[in-house]
Amino acid sequence: MGKITYQKAVTFSYDDGISQDIRLVALFQKYGMKATFNLNTGIQNEDSKFEIDGTPIHRMNQEDRLEQLYRGHEIAVHGLTHAFPLDLKPEEYEQEFLQDAKNIERLYGKYPIGMAYAYGDYSDNVIQYLQKIGIRYARTVESTHGFSLPQDPMRLKATCHHKDEQLFTLAEEFLAAKPKAGDPPMLFYVWGHSYEFDADNNWDRMEMLCQMLAGHDDIFYGTNAQCLGFDG
């Protein structure tokens, strides 16, 4: 990883470029949080919609000022069409991963260095290809329930999903920690999908978490890339 200068940091990772991101971004702005949003540029339009337990969900049109919405946050690869990586043949990697990265560069002005595996699906072959095209970290759907920096950024595990029963216990533990100079840096990393807050009717959960984490002088608030030392 790159150079780490903080002792404690907080970051978030949210997938799919869906309309509920508008409310989530506003919440992050309110409390000074930074996040990484993982987009599927091949299906990034309102026609790409689905439903979970009666909650309508649709991706946003990528030409509709999304650059302005996500400004100040990081945009990362999530696969052009959200395909299962393990279902892809090696000759399909370029279309699914590199084309997504190139689209992100065109739309957002910066080539992405991050990735979130669709469905948490990955393999050594996928990882090797991603590294070849400049991806430096990639998030799985696994949780550590801890705050250590990843030993392998291409198999990155978050602290937990925002639905995790231990979320607030972990937040309290993180806030209470007082690392000293020379101690390993601590990273509190939360991920999810913003539509889940509508589906579960619990936007107050994220607001409560942001309230807890906000405004601490000993915490660095950054994107995934910044917190991993890949983007100063």
Image (cartoon, grey):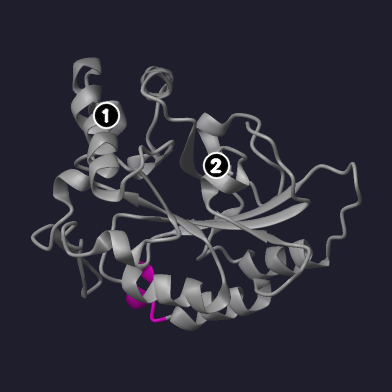
Q: Earlier in the sequence, mark 2 or mark 1?
A: 1
Q: Which mark is residue 98?
A: 1
Pick whichever, 208 or 100, lies toward us: 100
Q: Nearer the viewer, residue 27 or 176?
A: 27
Query: Depth check: 156 or 36 in front?
Result: 36
Per the rendered image, the range of residues in magenta is 196-201
Report helix, strand or loop for mark 1.
helix
**Residue 45 vertical placement versus 81 (above, below):** below
Residue 231: image tag:
2
Residue name at image x 19 percent, y 57 percent = 62
**Disc 2 residue type (three-letter):** Asp
| Residue drawn at 49 percent across, 83 percent down | 204
Which is more foreground, mark 2 or mark 1?
A: 2
Query: Tag 2, which secondary structure?
Result: loop
Rendered view: 157 above or below 190: above
Q: Residues within 10 Å of mark 1 (few under 14, many from 20)?
A: many
Magenta-colored segment: predominant secondary structure: helix
Residue 58 occupies quadrant: bottom left
Residue 33, placed above or below residue 200: above
